[in-house]
Image: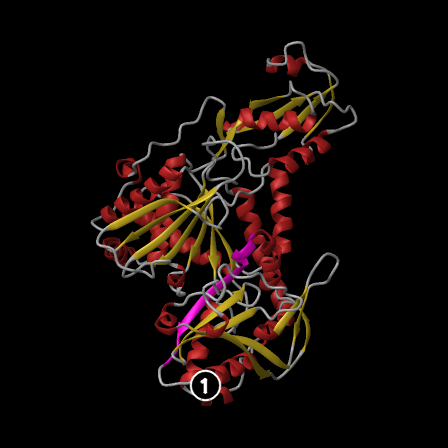
Amino acid sequence: MTAVETSTAHRTVRVPFAGHRAGRWPMPHGQSNVFDWMPHEGTGAVFVVHADLPAGHTVDDVLAAVGALVSRHEGLRTVYEVGPGVERAQVVCRSGAVEVTLLELGPQARGRTWITDPPRPFDHGVDFPVRMAVATDAGVPVRAVFEFSHTAADLVGANIVLDELVGLVASPAGAAAAPPAWQPADQAEHERTPEARRRMTRTLDYWRRQLETMPPCLVSTPARRQGEPEHRLATLRSTPLAAALAEIARRARVTPASVLVATTATLLCWWTDTDRAMLEALYSNRALPRMQSFVGSIAQSALVPFAPAPSFHETLRQTHLNIFNAYQYAYFDATAVEELVQSIGSQRGCQRHRDLVINDMSTTRGGVFDGRAGAPVRGTEVESGLATQTTGPVQLVILRTRPTVVVGLTHDVRHVTTDEAAELLWSMERILLTAAEGDIDYDRFGDLVGLDRVERGDTWVEIDSAWIDLALSEQVLREATGDPTARVVLRDGPVGTRSLVGYAAPADPRVDPRDVHRAIMATLGGRHGATAPDSYVLCAHPPRRPEDPAAWQAQPFRAAGTGR
């Protein structure tokens, strides 16, 4: 609500509900994962959706439908036990009341898309994780607006709620139907069965293989600017691109979203001169058994290996297969995966960077988040430098693929400037319009991209498909050891392999390679291009000419090892 909406324009009513059971259960993996990332999202942990209500019904009809809806879905009448030292749990209430705000807005009711702007965070220990409002025009209900906590539902789950509400308003007899057989409490119990644990073992094995073999960083480029992260949004809207996208998808036998994902990844690989990359695609997990009508948060990340093929159509087909294969391993215990990420990151000397995250909402009413409501445009429009709440080096959000393509590219301006983000989107358009006429050789990509390839200085080297900045890595080593003369030296190995050796005389003579390695891993943070040495040589004193690697190699050492 806004300041200009007087108290006579809205009122709050309490709607009773009565479900089939109550109790306390552990949290399923999806919900627990939400509580892991929620503190970093601010108001992004709450999302707002709406549905137009069928004509010919009263406010009382809508309120009765709300009561039936909350009675059916346990996740809408749940509070959560979370906090330091607390075993996470969901507590389902059998009966009670939910509040619904009635907003009399006149003709403006049909365009209402929010309850409060911005939405207020939920107190999950007290509040049910959903708020509801009904917008009326002269007392006639025309639109329902929901604020969801991501703990209660992902976007697919929210759409299930919206569809059921509309159905219950149109046909109140539906309230007598049995509630869904699979609720968050059932999912939590299932995750503790031997079958679910075997699946989790297979999932962790998949993640381990990808984390051990794929380059940890895609946007490993010289920083455009120093300082704290600053995120901006670039958007593309195109009506002609929708036809090209449909034609490419038909010819390659992939989905339109897969085309956009592969195009973006190929663009970034070409621009950054990177052979292989890891993509993180958010996945609904609705293909899992019993999840079609599930109202809860089960969307998680699929880790997708990516490599451009010699031809664009081949890249599309392989990316499509890789995405759908990764979907098999996209539901997991986030704590176990994070422990795996940290362990393998320490072994490799560089933590995984979530450099390209994909959020495809084109088939799940993602258009509700389009501020222009998907209004068609004559040609193609690109805007950049827009404000955003999303964080991460690069994130592609697909809101619509027809009749107008609407995508957003969120980026950290330290790595991708606003002008570069805009040009990446224009390049995407040129590539897709060209690909609709025929295949494109990867070697020809430069003819269609309006950016030059990233230039790296002499301090950059490529090791196992990963670009590494020796100067920045050396700076990290110096910070960790307190030795301003420490050096990182590139060493050639057998069969063309290369590795890094860190030489230092630590300020604290008690530290050993393991201490140094731990200190480096703690300070790498989001530094793109920085990595820990593969091994360490620690000396009591630096050589007289510390700038000379040979001088370090001739210096007596007191400890050496990988530090792992």
- Left or right position of 431 against 202: left
Q: Is residue 505 above or below residue 392?
A: above
Residue identifier under label 1: 61
- Left or right position of 21 against 373: right
- Closer to the camera in the image, 447 or 208: 447
Q: Is residue 26 above or below residue 259?
A: below
**Residue lying farthest to the right in this orientation:** 510
- Closer to the camera in the image, 31 or 267: 31
Residue at image coords 45%, 49%: 388
Tell whether position 45 is magenta: yes
Magenta residue span: 41-54
Q: Secondary structure at mark 1?
A: helix
The location of residue 550, given as percent across then percent down, is: 61, 13
Quarter residue 55 falls in: bottom left
**Callout 1 environment at 10 Å: few (<14), some (14 to 19), or many (20+)?**
some
Asked whether residue 500 is in view, the answer is: no
Tell whether position 223 is magenta: no
- Left or right position of 499 against 173: right
The location of residue 326, given as percent across then percent down, is: 48, 56
Residue at image coords 55%, 51%: 207
The location of residue 95, given as percent across then percent down, is: 63, 82
Image quadrant containing the C terminus: top right
Asked whether residue 368 is in view, the answer is: yes
